[in-house]
Image (spheres, rainbow, N blue to C red):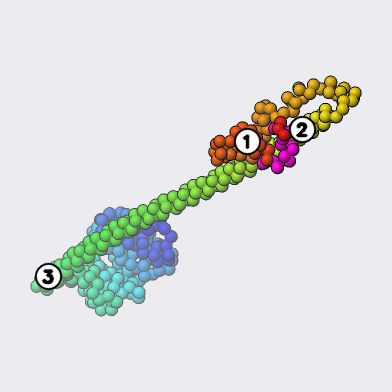
Amino acid sequence: YTEQAFRYPFLSRRDEVSTYNNTAMVYLRLKRYTKADSLFHRTISLARSYGDTTYEGIASGEYGRSFLLQGHTRQALPFLYRAYHLCMGEAPERSAIAALDLASALLSIDSTAKAEAFIRQARAIQTHNTIWADYALAYYQTQTLYERKAGHYVNALAYQDSVMMVKDSLRIQFNDRLVANTEIRTNAERYLSSLQHLEAEKRAAILIRNIICITLLVVTAAGGYALHQNRQKRQREKEILLERQKRADDELVHATAQLRQHMRYLQEKNELIEQLTAELAQPAIPEAQQRIAAVPVEDLLQRTLLTEADWQRFRRLFEQVYPGFFETLQQQYPDLTPADVRLLALSKLELPSKDIGFMLGVS
């Protein structure tokens, strides 16, 4: 995780130096000393280039401790001395730890007097964190080594008991921290599960919303299309009705004109019959006789009477002008004779009685 931090920009130079130092300490705990020493050396160079004397001292102290753990006591001393002096201002607890490490290194090379002096200096340093666990453990361990070296075995046993008590206390704290971390992890997993559940509900809600929106759009489009089709259908029906009405009106006008023309034709024939009848009633004159000779009277009377053919043509034209007239008449008065029907049809046209008589061939 510390190595992953190098993928991102640091907020400050101290963050960068601190990350290098923490990564080196991880490798030191893993006893991968070569990698740890390389990173400590990098941290010291980087802190020195940034002018950060505090972290230069912190990294130097850890670098010296690495040499101590590897059994390189004399190589550790220069870095421990530097850490002791550089950390005095901003990180006095680190100076105290460096002093105790110096005492341990000096004891290993039989410099007992110097070691005792650094132990006293470690006790005299006013640390900001007086209950710092690393300081207590390092102090009792160093004091145990000193008492053994000085031959004070009773004191050495007492300090050894203190070392065991501090370790037990640290173990309890570590276990409590494990429990707390387990609870935190459980709560975090529960929280993540809740987030995943909420996210699933959110996705489901979004899906339902999208389905509803799409359904509404489809229904709206279908409704609009159906409304448009219905409007077009009504428009077509209206146009058809108008066209039929126009055709019916045209047919009515045409039939009326034909009926009038037929009636005029019949009326003209009746007038001709009347004229010829009147001429026959007068004394014969050569001119009248010549006309009568040209047109046989009997044949003319046959053509001018309202024959069945004339009646059928008249009836077709009449029904176009007055649709349903004959059917209604027949339903209401089934006893009417064909002559009665013809008389009523001609009466419907409001013709003079004389004209009707001529058309029907009666007086």
- The CA distance from mark 2 to mark 3 is 158 Å
Q: Is residue 142 visible?
A: no
Give me the residue at 74% from left, 28% from top. 304
Q: In this rendering, would 286 be left or right of 38?
A: right
Q: Residues within 10 Å of mark 3 (few under 14, many from 20)?
A: some
Closer to the camera in the image, 243 or 98: 243
Q: Quadrant of residue 274?
A: top right
Give me the residue at 26% from left, 60% from top. 190
Q: Position of residue 320 (x, y in %)?
A: 65, 37
Closer to the camera in the image, 150 or 85: 85
Residue tagged by mark 2? 270
In this picture, is 28 found above or below 323?
A: below
Q: Is residue 157 magenta?
A: no
Q: Main secondary structure of the magenta part?
A: helix
Q: In this rendering, would 332 be left or right of 86?
A: right
In this picture, is 235 found above or below 1?
A: above
Q: Which mark is residue 340?
A: 1
Name the amino acid, label 3.
Asp
Question: Which secondary structure lies at badge 3?
Answer: helix
Q: Which mark is residue 161?
A: 3
Closer to the camera in the image, 83 or 208: 208
Q: Is residue 292 visible?
A: yes
Name the amino acid, label 2.
Asn
- The CA distance from mark 3 to mark 1 is 149 Å
- The CA distance from mark 2 to mark 1 is 20 Å
Q: How many marks?
A: 3
Q: Quadrant of residue 349?
A: top right
Q: Which stretch is magenta?
A: 348-360
